[in-house]
Structure formats: C-alpha cells, structure tokens
C-alpha cells in the first residue's frame, strides 16, 4: 500500500472536483421525538470528520440525513453548488442522485460475487467500457493492499479484507462525498488498531470530504481531523481531537473523552483563571472552566495520565488508601480511595501502599460548575 503522501489519481472521465459539505440548522423528527435539534456542520474537501457521541445522541441520524436515507424536517444540506435538502424550498434529492460513496458496518458485499465483481458493480451500472472497469478496479485493489485477491469471494476473506473491499467499491466511481457508518466496528481489537492507519491514509488521499460515525473515541481521535461530538441531538463541541481532549467546553465533553476521574470538590476561591478547591480535606488548584462560586461544589476532572506518585515536598496533591492494583502488562492500574471516591491512575511499577499520595499540575486539572 502507498504511503500517506501518495495521491489518489482521478480514475477516469468523471467529475472529481472536491466540494465542501455544509449542514445548516438541520432538524430531524420522528413523530413527536426530535432527534436532531438544529445541527450545523461544515466538512472541507480533504477533511475527515468523525461523528461521535453516546447512543441516542443523533450521530447515525445525521449521517443518514446527509446520505438521503432520512428526510429532515428543517434545515439545509449542500455539497458545493448542489443542494441535497432545503426545508424552506421543499427540496429533497434522493440518495441515488447525490453521488455518494457509502461504507457500511456490515460490509454489504454480495457473497456470490467475487471481489472484482463487487468493486466493479457500480462502474458497470454507469456503462464504462470493460477495459476501463478492469483498470480502475485493479488499481484500487492494489492501493488498498488487495492485489491478487480479485478472484476470491467475500467468504474467503478476513474481516479487514472485506472492509477494504467495501471501501474500494465506494471509491470506484469517484464519489463526491464519502460517508462511513462505523466502518471498523466488526473487526477484532488488534485488527481495528491496524485498520485505523490504512483507513485514514485512504480517506485523506482521495481529497474528498469524508464523514464517519463511530462509537469508539480512540478510533475517532486516531482517524479524524476534527470530531463533532453530539449530545441529545445537538453539537456539544466541534474541533480537533486534541482541542476536545485538552480544552473541553463543557463537563460532558471532558467526561466523555478519555474516561477521566470526575470528583466533587468545594470551591475555596478564584485567582487568574484558576480555582482553589478542597477535595476530601486536601487543598488543590485547577483550571476554572466556568462560573465557579466560592463555597459551592464543583466537578473536578482529573485524567489518569496527569496523576503521578508524589515526591518529597511536592504540592497540589491528594492522598488515600491504595484500594486496588491491577497488572495490565504495559502498566499497573492503581485505584486510590480518597474520601468516598475512587481515583484511577497508572504507574509503570507496583506501589507499596497502603497510603499513597499523588500530585498533578494545576493546568492539567479542570474544574467545572456542578
């Protein structure tokens, strides 16, 4: 397979112009249930955006609305100069006229057709000359590491190979937009980690806007240029993976990404963007992430990787009894009982206990209003 710097050359005499996807104030309702509540999102040409959120947040509905599989109740969807949906004008373009490349969780391959025939199907529908069909299909299979497998049937392939065939089929006729619905969820954990690399490489090399749904935050952070995090039908925050992880705009974003420790602390005071807090009797400082009030409770977000055993004289820490120490191979997962809460962190070596003190930098701790 080619390196990440390689380019996907146009595969034939089709319109390969890259266009931005624009979703404006989109609403989707099923009966009385409002699933999307005014969602707006842009995806630039060559950009990969992940739709992430808990079950029921609306991420799959948003993807299906862009694909034309769900008809919105209000808003607008455009791809460059082409309008997919306009609620005010009553315009709805059916899926088959949107020139989309769709990749499904289930692969959706025809079991009775070979790899070549699966990928060639859309090209033959467009009545391309057979010589050109063969050239395109073999070129795509080579790019996706499937050279030599064109004569096999889907049942003779691994899960990862089947997903690559599904992606090749979506790319074959140069779609203007790529939509992927949990494309790696059927793969086992080790293969899924490897697949993140070739999937991002492939999507970026096309130069097309790409939108994909995932429930796996690690997958979203590894593959996407930006993450659109949805919560109860609204966009909670949109930004780069690092931006959402390090600079969350709400407690929901901070709590959803990274599985942090979220603890109750009392606000003692505020100073230059930081809050002074008391956590189980220990004074600590953290970044103030909203309007905090002295004497009131706050939610303190401590990411496990920001905690480390204290050395002599270090401040801004908490102390507790070592409740659990789990060996995970690469590290020990430690669970510290601090007051009534359990605080999780990792160490490369086991801790002696029974009392352990851990410290953290104030910049790496986040205090949100309760």
Image (tube, grey):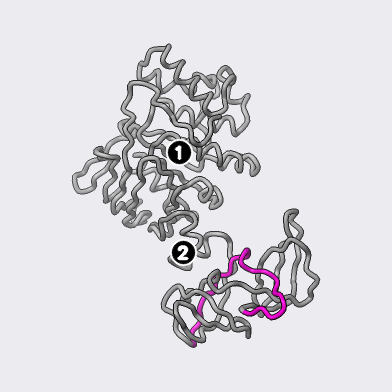
User: What range of the chain is rendered magenta?
Assistant: 295-315
Q: Nearer the viewer, residue 147 or 185?
A: 147
Q: Is residue 297 above or below residue 98?
A: below
Q: Which residue is mark 1?
A: 204
Q: Earlier in the sequence, mark 1 or mark 2?
A: 1
Q: Residue furthest left?
A: 89
Q: Position of residue 248 (x, y in %)?
A: 46, 64
Q: Residue at x 49, y 57 (%)?
A: 242
The residue pinned by badge 2 equals 248
Q: Crowding near pointer 2: few (<14 within 10 Å), some, many (20+)? A: many
What is the C-alpha distance between the residues marked 1 and 2? 26 Å
Q: Which of the labelled discs sits on residue 61, or is there none?
A: none
Q: Position of residue 144 (x, y in %)?
A: 53, 29
Residue 45 or residue 173, whichever sits in front: 45
Q: Position of residue 153 (x, y in %)?
A: 58, 21
- The spot of residue 129 in percent (x, y) is 38, 12
- Could you tell whether 355 is left or right of 276 in the image? right
The relative height of residue 59 versus residue 351 in the rendered view (above or below) is above
Q: Secondary structure at mark 2?
A: loop
| Nearer to me, 303 or 233 | 303
- Locate the N terminus and report the quarter of the image it occupies: top right
Quarter of the figure with residue 259: bottom right
Q: Secondary structure at mark 1?
A: helix
| 313 within the magenta span | yes
Residue shown at the point (58%, 80%) measured from the top left: 284
Q: Residue at x 53, y 76 (%)?
A: 286
């Amino acid at each position: 397979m080619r390196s990440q710097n390689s380019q996907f050359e146009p595969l034939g005499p089709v319109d390969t112009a890259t266009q931005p996807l624009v979703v404006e104030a989109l609403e989707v309702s099923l009966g009385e249930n409002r699933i999307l509540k005014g969602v707006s999102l842009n995806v630039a040409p060559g950009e990969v955006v992940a739709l992430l959120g808990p079950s029921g947040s609306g991420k799959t509905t948003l993807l299906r609305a862009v694909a034309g599989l769900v008809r919105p109740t209000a808003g607008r969807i455009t791809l460059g100069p082409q309008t997919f949906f306009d609620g005010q004008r009553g315009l709805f373009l059916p899926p088959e006229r949107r020139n989309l490349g769709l990749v499904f969780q289930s692969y959706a391959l025809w079991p009775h057709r070979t790899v070549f025939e699966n990928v060639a199907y859309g090209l033959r529908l467009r009545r391309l000359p057979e010589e050109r069909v063969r050239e395109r299909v073999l070129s795509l299979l080579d790019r996706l590491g499937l050279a030599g497998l064109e004569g096999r049937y889907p049942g003779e392939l691994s899960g990862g190979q089947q997903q690559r065939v599904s992606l090749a089929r979506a790319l074959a006729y140069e779609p203007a937009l790529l939509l992927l619905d949990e494309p790696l969820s059927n793969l086992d954990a080790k293969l899924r980690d490897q697949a993140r690399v070739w999937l991002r490489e492939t999507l970026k090399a096309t130069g097309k806007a790409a939108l994909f749904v995932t429930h796996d935050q690690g997958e979203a952070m590894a593959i996407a240029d930006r993450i659109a995090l949805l919560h109860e039908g609204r966009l909670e925050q949109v930004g780069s993976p690092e931006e959402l992880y390090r600079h969350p705009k709400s407690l929901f974003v901070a709590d959803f990404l990274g599985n942090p420790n979220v603890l109750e602390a009392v606000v003692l005071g505020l100073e230059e963007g930081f809050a002074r807090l008391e956590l189980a009797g220990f004074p600590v400082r953290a970044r103030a992430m909203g309007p905090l009030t002295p004497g009131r409770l706050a939610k303190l977000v401590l990411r496990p990787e920001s905690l480390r055993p204290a050395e002599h004289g270090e401040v801004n820490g908490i102390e507790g009894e070592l409740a659990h120490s789990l060996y995970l191979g690469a590290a020990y997962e430690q669970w510290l009982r601090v007051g009534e809460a359990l605080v999780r962190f990792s160490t490369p070596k086991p801790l002696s206990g029974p009392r352990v003190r851990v410290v953290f930098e104030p910049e790496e701790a986040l205090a949100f209003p309760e």
